[in-house]
Amino acid sequence: MVEPKLEIQMLHDRVMIKKVEGAGERRSSAGIVIPATAQVAKRLVWGEVVGVGQHVRTVKPGDRVLLAPEDQYEVEIGGVGHLVMRERDLHAVATEATQHGTGLYL
């Protein structure tokens, strides 16, 4: 018997995020490779929003968001790891047009 596919709907203020690749190993401005295991301070990572609950006001699916890896829960869907967290735990959203931006761009 084939199981039916069930659509996932996020609840309340929860956001489901897919981590953007390359969040581990990185290069310094001088070209030195810094391994993912090297940790000087708590490092924030970028992810892509794939689902939001009905009380989420600031982000929408497709947005790139900045988050702290330790503030999340991980779930595997279709063999791909996703993160689930509250909207208030997100630190920033990368968007094309904003009124209160930093002047920095990805």
Image (cartoon, rainbow, N blue to C red):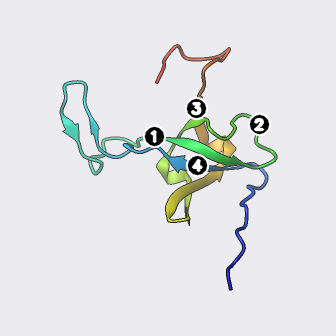
Return the x and y of residue 13 as percentages of the image width and height. 75, 48
**Between discs 4 and 1, the one toward the N terminus:** 4
* Spatial separation of the CA atoms under disc 2 and disc 1: 22 Å
Q: Is residue 95 above or below residue 71?
A: above
**Between discs 2 and 1, the one toward the N terminus:** 1
Q: Is residue 104 above or below residue 64?
A: above
Q: Is residue 76 above or below residue 49?
A: below
Tag 3: amino acid: Ala
Closer mark to the observer between disc 2 and disc 4: 4
Q: Residue at x 41, y 43 (%)?
A: 42
* Spatial separation of the CA atoms under disc 2 and disc 4: 15 Å
Q: Tags 3 and 1 in contact by the CB under 8 Å rule?
A: no
Q: Which residue is mark 3?
A: 92
* Spatial separation of the CA atoms under disc 3 and disc 1: 10 Å
Kindly state the secondary structure of the residue where label 2 is placed.
loop
Kindly state the secondary structure of the residue where label 1 is placed.
loop
Q: Which residue is mark 2?
A: 57
Return the x and y of residue 19 as percentages of the image width and height. 49, 48
